[in-house]
Structures are given as structure tokens and as C-alpha cells.
Amino acid sequence: MKTVLLLMMFSVSFSLFADEEWRTPKPEDMVYLELESGTVVIELAPFMAPEHVKQFKNLVREGFYDGLDFYRVIDGFVAQAGDFSEKKASKHKSSLNAELDRNMVMASDFNVVQSPEFIAPETGYIQSFAAGRDLKSKKEWLLHCYGAVAMARDNDINSGTTDFYIAIGQAPRHLDRNMSTFGRVISGMQHVQAVKRGNKDKGGVIDEVSARSKILSAKVASDLIAEKRLEIQVQKDTSQAFNKRLQSARKLENEFFHFKGNGNLDVCYYQTKVQLNN
Amino acid sequence: MKTVLLLMMFSVSFSLFADEEWRTPKPEDMVYLELESGTVVIELAPFMAPEHVKQFKNLVREGFYDGLDFYRVIDGFVAQAGDFSEKKASKHKSSLNAELDRNMVMASDFNVVQSPEFIAPETGYIQSFAAGRDLKSKKEWLLHCYGAVAMARDNDINSGTTDFYIAIGQAPRHLDRNMSTFGRVISGMQHVQAVKRGNKDKGGVIDEVSARSKILSAKVASDLIAEKRLEIQVQKDTSQAFNKRLQSARKLENEFFHFKGNGNLDVCYYQTKVQLNN
């Protein structure tokens, strides 16, 4: 009774495919957020939002986020962090032009899973990030799945500066192509889930600074000495193991499943795995 | 910059509609789980899974869950609780016949939102629970949205007894019509999110009993004296306020939205609100 329900999430990864199944994110594309409950690892997506990634890394390296907090947190929606006072000085606070999507490239690395999909014309993965695509407009973008990291902004689409949020519940897909998504949490979502929630009637804002969960520090992984870096690997969406899992999920082959579904897959549910070796 | 992103989640509920907007769940249909971090309120769904509700309430009243724990917890998927040892005695451990769906009733209270939908033929709400429907087979069922509560089981579809799980991430919709969903968390999901995670490589099981998050106690609300009961109200999915929100969400009318979407709604994202007055 205890073993079966979760089986489909953890199919064994055969060592035969090990070479092609995993990739190691570049240390310069990872940010470690040290929260009170543990380390959160964000993989950045410079292929989709290069200017947001650049500014975010500059802010991290400046120490901008160190000591700041999660000031707006709504269970099931987002945890938003940064400088609620808007007073903290920085050399890297310029308003960013939105990076909502990118033009399809000739040799696209978009791995189609659903066509058509419910919210986007097509969904799939780009470099293990859940993504959407529109063949008509020839655009590709990242989805607001669980763990997505995007820049907060005002009504002006080009008003993001420093504050960011992490999606912590059911994917808010209406934010796809509306917000500049520049990364995703690849490890430590349980620590994001541990941050204190705000009052929904106040839009999730936590007024008391002392009641907010802190960002102790933020670091770009490549700035750390080797011993302080995590050994982390991301499953490739193009790997045989991952595609086998998708195939099995389409048919719900396991005898555990009585109802076999309609073959459609929600790419926000089937995210690629991550291995942490230390 | 701080105010806009979350606006759409918290449209003001006009007092004009107050009478018809909210319903108070029956105390006999609510279970309070006292966890280490706070109170979780489950609303039961006897209209969908009467025998599961009956057995669950019997177990709660017997004190079966008191002192037991969340022994299998996978971030982004489920938190499963009960008796991992399978040794705790109970008068209410009989195997339950699956209650995966119900026959459509003549005067159905199914409020259609999406037809067709991506995973189910139609989705909408029944008594504020996100639900699916199939007009061909004339069946209706509850969806595995964030906060759904269902009975764990073995491969045998009729093998659920005592242990249950709560969905804590992106809706695992492949479990719809495969598991007997008998309730949903209407308050305190942040406390469920605070439970300790297991190791994914071990299917989420936490071997060390001392490392598991405990259920301090479980009570049926109607068994508590009035002062110990929570004043809790659930927004009706048939209310003007909720339907206005859905309508607005379909068009993404707010000027915050640059990209207006395709009009489709994920009912697992747009759940009805809950008010807690004490």
C-alpha cells in the first residue's frame, strides 16, 4: 500500500544512459539563495532572458539581496522577494526591457510534448525548462511552472528592476508571456515552501519586517570555491530515460492505473529530475 | 511594482453579494488536523465518496491518526500520512471499495467552466470542489488539484483503508479517476507545506520515525465545543463574485496583462476562496 502510488515519479535511471541523461549546469548560470531553512538553487536561463540574467547576477554579486526578505507570499501562488522599501542602493537597478519570449531559432532545441496544448499552442521543453511555442508567430517562451523564477514588475511591461518571485503552487499559466521568466529552482523548493505566508486579504504582504523570512545571502555558484559548490545535475529533456517516462505517462501503463487517461501531458507536472550528490 | 501582480487573486468581494457568495461547511463535514506548525482544515466530500468519508471520520473519532505522521513526502507532489507500520489497531480498517466518481444526477450542481478541457472532457466545480465530467459516460469526479485529499491504496483499486495523502504541488491529474478523492484542504496548506520532505530516491519515504512531521491530533469539527471551532466560509462557485473573477481571468482584462491568453482556464488554478474569521 505504501509503495505504489509514487512509483511513476521515480523510474530507475539506468547507468547505461548516464552519459547522455544528465547535464551539469554551468556554475555561472546558477545562483544559491541561502534561506533560513536551507539552500535554494536557481538555474538561470540566459538563452531566454539574457538581460534579466545579467542584472540579477550583478545584483547578487553586489550583495543586494543579502539580508532582504520574502515580503509578499501567497500560499499556492508565489513567494516574492527583494526590497519592499525600494530604498536599498544599488548600481544595478535600471528598469529592464521585458524578455517575454524569444524568436524561434533555426536549429531549435524545443522538444515538443503537446501540440496543441490547453493554454499554449504547443508545450515541451527547452534545455529542461518547461516551455511553450507558437509556430505562427515563431516565438518560444518559458512556462510559469512550479519553481519558475521571474522578475516582478508594475503595469509597465518594462518596469522590472530587482524584485523577483518563485511560483509555489499550481502553475499560474496566465503569467506566461506576461512576465520575464529568467530561471527555475532546481533544488530546495521545500525551503521556499518554508517561508512565512502573508495575509491574503492584504495581497500577501507581510507588513512586519521581522515576520518575514530572510534571504541570508545570494551567491553565483562560480564565485564560490570548489568545495562550497553543490554537485548538481539536471536530467536532459532529450534523454532516453525522460522520454521513456513521458511515454509511459501518456499511456499510464503501470497496473496501478485503472483509468488510462486521454494521453495528454501537463509539462508543468512532468518536470525533469535533478540529482544532488552532496 | 509591489501591488499589481497579485491583484487578480484577490478581487474585492462586494458585501452586496455576501449572502449568496459564501457557504459555511457543515461541522460534521470538516476535519481539523493539528500539525506541529498549525491547524489544517479538510472539507470532506460525502457527495462524492460517502464510504471513504464515513471511514475517515470513524478513524478520526477513534483517535487513529493522533500521533501518527507524514511518512512519505515528495515536494511538488504529495504528503502522505497514516500508519507506515500498518500495526496500529483500529475497528475501522476495512478495505474500501473505490469511489472514483459518481453518476451524474438529473439536477446536477456541476458548474461547467471548460468544455472541452485538456485532461478531462469537461471541468468545472461541484460545491466549490474542482471537478471533471464526462457527458458520454455520465460520470462526474473530483480533480487532484492543489490541496486535494485522497485515500492511498495498493494496485488493487479497492485496497484503500486508512492512509491518505494531500496534493502539494502541480495537480497530478493522472490520478483523477484513479484514486478516491474524498476532501480538500480549505485552510492551512502552509502547514502541510511545512512538513518534512523525504528522499526522492527512496520514493519520498522518511525512514526515521523521529524525523517525520507528526499529526498531533485529528478531530471532526462537530465534536468540538463551539469555542474551539473555526469560523470558516467557502466561496460558492456559483456566486456572482467568483464567476466575475473567472470571466475576468478568461480575458485577462486588467491592464497588467500584455498578452491576453486564449481564454482557457485551469480550474485547479482558479479555486474558490476561503474566509477564516478567527
Image (spheres, coloured by chain):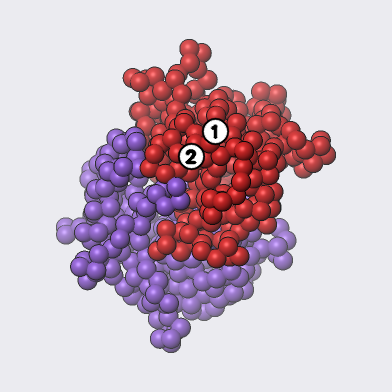
Chain colours: A red, B purple
- Tell me, for residue B76, which label it has, or none: none
What amino acid type should be assigned to the residue bearing mark 1? Answer: His
| Residue holding disc 1 | A52
Q: Quadrant of the C terminus of chain A?
A: top right
**Chain to which the residue tagged by mark 2 belongs:** A
Residue B230 vs residue B83, the one in the foreground: B230
Residue B84 visible, this angle: no
Q: Give the percent coordinates (x, y) of residue A262.
A: 37, 36
Q: Give the percent coordinates (x, y) of residue A35.
A: 66, 53
Q: Secondary structure at mark 2?
A: loop
| Residue holding disc 2 | A160
The answer to whether the residues at label 2 and label 1 have Cβ atoms under 8 Å apart is yes
Residue A214 vs residue A64, the one in the foreground: A64
Q: Quadrant of the N terminus of chain A?
A: bottom right
Q: Residue at x 42, y 80 (%)?
A: B229
Task: Tell me which corner region of the image, top left, top right, bottom left or bottom right, holds residue A177.
Answer: top left
